[in-house]
Amino acid sequence: MEKRALKLRPCLSQLNAYVAGKGYTEISRKYNLPPGDIVKLGSNENPYGPTPKVARALQSIFPERYPEPEELLSALSGYIGFPEENIVVGAGMDGVMETLTRLFLEKGDKSFIPIPTFSYYEILTILSGATPVFVDRSLDFEIPQTVPNNVKMAFICSPNNPTGNASSEETVLQILETTEAIVFLDEAYVEFADKSLVNLVKDNDNLIVGRTMSKAFGLAGLRIGYAVAPDWIANQYRRAAPPFFGITCASVAAGITALNDLDYMHNSVLKIRSERERLLKEMRSYPSQANFLYVKTIEPSDITAEKFLKQGIIIRDCHSFRGAVSHHIRVTVGTSEQNNRFLEVYQKLCR
């Protein structure tokens, strides 16, 4: 075993595995609960799902054929307002970031990561052989307006996971104007926010804006991520990406169909935003521009989360987020009925 371990890359010793939200099967087995009685509010999924037209589109795919992403790229171009040449796709936001870190990070490089935030930035940095430079956010979770010297790549999540706040245009511009680093702005949750900063790509050749169809479009299970990038980056991305960008016939068909029914997506977002404001009035939560709330707990967060699980409600214990310490949970905004169930338990356990 020791000889085999010597063949592994040394950087793996620094790696903390990604911690995903808990699922129905795990909680059903552990607590002997019927899956239908479980409310899942731990993974920031869209409780309304995708447009019903997606199910019909999936019935017409040809799984024996390789995917053809051209029509998906065209639909994304129409949605986001950039030429197809500036749009790249991948198997979820994760797949997009994996290809981008192949382009920019290697041994000896550094990345800038304001914490707490999405932990996959750290994982990709380490797997690239680079070193993450962590900087604490302020008490209201704002990021610094400057990036340390000698940083090759900066990761900014806005709205930020898990805190829910969005970085201002002023802050992002200040960073772009004062660093030579490649800035990756993760806008996975931007459809739930007041403003997108994607148009900044037009005037900043060191900015990449990442997006996903997992959240607002309700396609988390089909893994469709994309990014808007300057020409010089998009061209190299296409050289380094896996065949067919790692996407599938099913994800292409679903993505095109969802993008052709924007009314459904916008209606889902309106309902989630309305429910988010209702929950904010009932809880000890920080303000949010996303489809989840970041909530401070009196007891340690692992104890609080466990109590909710025993009641059949999955929420996210945030102690696995570097910099989040041990008294915060993250709660996905569900349907009105799901939120009522959550609030009933919250008022019993957390008041």
Image: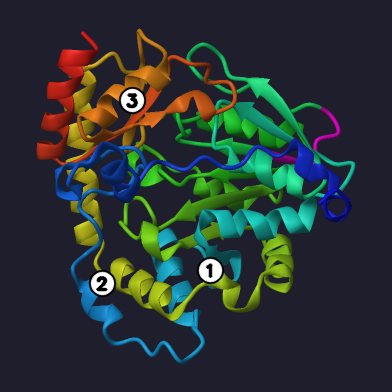
Q: Nearer the viewer, residue 47 or 344?
A: 344
Q: Amino acid at mark 2?
A: Val
Identify the residue at horizontal 23%, vertical 16% (top origin): 283
Residue with the mark numbered 2 = 54
What is the x, y in percent for residue 30?
Answer: 32, 39
Q: Nearer the viewer, residue 31 or 200?
A: 31
In which image quadrant can residue 233 be found?
bottom right
**8 to 179, vertically: above or below:** below
Dot 2: within a 10 Å radius of its alpha carbon, few (fewer than 14), some, or many (20 or more) residues?
A: many
Q: Along the horizontal axis of the image, is 269 left or right of 103?
A: left
Residue 83 is tagged as 1
What is the x, y in percent for residue 108?
Answer: 90, 41
Between marks 3 and 1 in the image, the one whose residue lies nearer the viewer: 3
**330 to 225, vertically: above or below:** above
Q: Is residue 152 magenta?
A: yes
What is the x, y in percent for residue 175?
Answer: 67, 31
Mark 3 vs 2, N-terminal side: 2
Q: Along the horizontal axis of the image, is 79 left or right of 340?
A: right
Which range of residues does the magenta coloring cover?
149-154
Residue with the mark numbered 3 = 306
Between marks 2 and 1 in the image, the one whose residue lies nearer the viewer: 2
Marks 2 and 1, Cα distance to the nearest angstrom?
25 Å
Marks 3 and 2, Cα distance to the nearest angstrom?
35 Å
What is the x, y in percent for residue 262?
Answer: 26, 62
